[in-house]
Image (spheres, grey):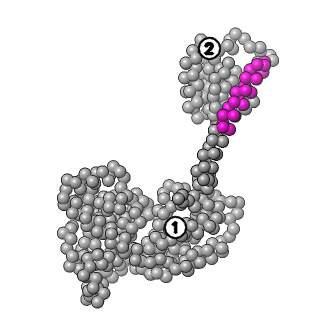
Amino acid sequence: MTSDEQAAPQSDIEALLPWHAAGTLSRRDAQRVEEALARDPELARRYALVREELGETIHLNETLGAPSARAIEALFAKIDAEPKRAGGSTVGLGTRLAGWLGGLTPRTLAFAGSAAVLAILLQAGLLAGLVLKQSDTAGFESASAPRSASEAGVFVLIRFAPQASVADINAFLAQNKLSIAAGPLPGDLYKVRLGDAAMSKDAAADAVKKLQQDKVVGFVVGTQ
Amino acid sequence: MQTTSDEVLIARIAGGDRLAMQVLFARHHVRVYRFVLRLVRNEATAEDLISEVFLDIWRQAGKFEGRSAVSTWMLSIARFKALSVLRRRQESELDEELAERIEDQADDPETALAKKDKGAILRQCLTKLSAEHREVIDLVYYHEKSVEEVAEITGIPQPTVKTRMFYARKKLSELLKAQGIDRGWP
């Protein structure tokens, strides 16, 4: 910080005038400046000076010319001299995804989005079909312990998030007073006992919604 | 017409796409050149520096996280390189003295002619500001950078950006006054 920066402009609004003239203030700050300009003629006079500076700074820079072709030739000569990038780039997934999406036309993007939705719906249907098929059999019952009256109740099918650890899952089950009734079933699903048979449909639906919010849960749906 | 965003170009450059590099260069090289030229005041040096700036972009594209605009990132690199040159030339400390010496000199024909035009005098005074003041004026007025972006490029806190801009303008008024133009401010 230089010595003259120890002091400050007369007001915060006055300090913002250059950015207001350049149009780079947030809407809120721009509104504050506009209101101050409307009620303060001296500030408005100073704003006219700022606009004058803005115009002349642009004029000055625009007369500076442009670099010669030597600059781009030198750049690509240096790029050509660079070692080849091994193993692809280190760019993050998000940036690569942005690059890929950016290369798609809006029509292609819309089609890809529709296809993705369709694929998700098909997958959900397939999973539900598999589960229903399983539930028609004795697949959920262990050979040594046939289903008893105590196993009656309200159940959900859960697929846990891939990144969830065993400790996370145990904590999640304990916290929500859940117990695994069967699994893993096809699709890495587990049948989990949500409550007793007296649980209302609405209460079960609310419980499923709540479970879906947990980061441990990748997918959850009610089942018989 | 849809244009490829700078962020997408950077992602492609990170993958070694030379064409994306050409597009990014064509899009930004003039502004980067002018920013650097205003700091180093030498066209040949400025040309050398912009090829260095874009080479850094080629090398570091994979590390760009998109937290700021690509143009802000570029100007940060350009500024760093320009200041390195200035430090080597030890010119930064001499800027204000140089400006004062120029100020004291008798008017040459060009200056005398310029005095007929307030705008020309103002532009002349803009060239006499210190590197620090020229930089903030250019970033705000010409490169259209917000307070936050100027802070990021220059590495100073946002309140200091505002006060530095204020005092750059104050110095400009003083230079104008010395040229016979009293703006009644500050």
Magenta-highlighted residues = A118-140
Dot 1, crowdedness within 10 Å: few (<14), some or many (≥20)? few
* CB contact under 8 Å: marks 1 and 2: no
Closest to the observer: A134 or B130? A134
Type of amino acid at the residue the image marks with label 2: Asp
Residue lying furthest top in this view?
A149
Mark yes or no: residue B100 visible.
Answer: yes
Q: Chain of mark 2?
A: A
Type of amino acid at the residue the image marks with label 1: Arg
Residue B100 appears at what percent x and percent y? 28, 81
* Quarter holding residue A192: top right
Q: Quadrant of the C terminus of chain B?
A: bottom left
Dominant secondary structure of the residues highlighted in magenta in the image: helix
Write down the residue under mark 2. Answer: A196
Closest to the observer: A58 or A144? A58
> Eyeballing the image, is B75 above or below B111?
above
Q: Is A39 part of what is drawn in magenta?
A: no
> Eyeballing the image, is B25 above or below A110?
below
